[in-house]
Image: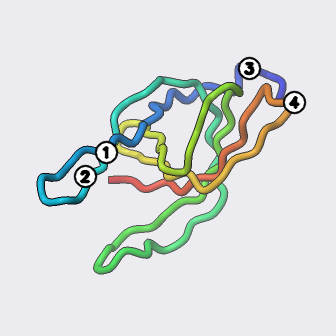
Amino acid sequence: MSDPGRLRTRLTLLQPVESDDGEGGVVRTLVPQATLWAAVTPLALRDGDEADADSAELHCRIVLRGGVALTRQHQFSDGTRSYRILGWRELQQGRLLEIDTLQRQA
């Protein structure tokens, strides 16, 4: 993917932030870290795995420009859709990142 015009979906990168819950544990929230242009490609649909959930998850591939520091705790969002990161790899000597995700729609 050398055509930057294919990066036409605007995603928000959500960073995990942990805070004390007052009872010896932590509460993890996701806060916006950056807005990025990406190419989102749906790949395969699978049934949701949460108890009592009537939903499905869509396996997607996200490609964006390199130089973004990620962890598996980060997520992406696009309106009502959220994308949980499964893993990623660098393409074109680090100029692009290809990220495997599971999309869930609220």
Q: Nearer the viewer, mark 4 or mark 3?
A: 4
Q: How many marks?
A: 4
Kindly give the residue lying farthest to the bottom in the view shown. 51
User: Label 4: how many residues lie within 10 Å, few (<14), some (14-19) or many (20+)?
Assistant: few
Separation (CA) of disc 3 from disc 2:
38 Å
Give the image location of residue 71, x and y in percent.
56, 45
Q: Residue furthest right?
A: 93
Q: Residue at x 78, y 38 (%)?
A: 90
Could you classify mark 3 by the number of other residues whose Cα lies within 10 Å: few (under 14), some (14-19), or many (20 or more)? few
Tell me the kind of residue under disc 3.
Answer: Pro
- How many other residues sit within 10 Å of disc 1, few (<14), some (14-19) or many (≥20)? few
Check disc 3 and report the residue beneath it. Answer: 4
* Earlier sequence position, callout 2 versus callout 1: 1
Cβ–Cβ under 8 Å for marks 4 and 3: no
| Number of residues whose C-alpha sits closer than 10 Å to that of mark 2, classed few (under 14), some (14–19) or many (20 or more) | few
Q: SS of the residue at dot 4?
A: helix
Outermost residue toward the left in this view? 22
| Mark 3 / mark 2, whichever is N-terminal | 3
| Residue 94 percent coordinates (x, y) | 80, 30
Mark 2 or mark 4: name the one nearer the start of the chain.
2
| Residue linked to disc 1 | 18
| Tag 2–tag 1 contact (CB < 8 Å) | yes
What is the three-letter code of the residue carrying label 4?
Gln
Q: What numbered label is drawn on residue 93?
A: 4
Q: Which mark is residue 27?
A: 2
Question: Where in the figure is residue 98, as x and y percent of width and height?
Answer: 72, 42
Q: Which mark is residue 55?
A: none
Q: Which residue is found at the position 57% from the left and 66% from the top?
A: 45
Q: Of callouts 1 and 4, which one flags the residue occurring earlier in the amino acid sequence?
A: 1
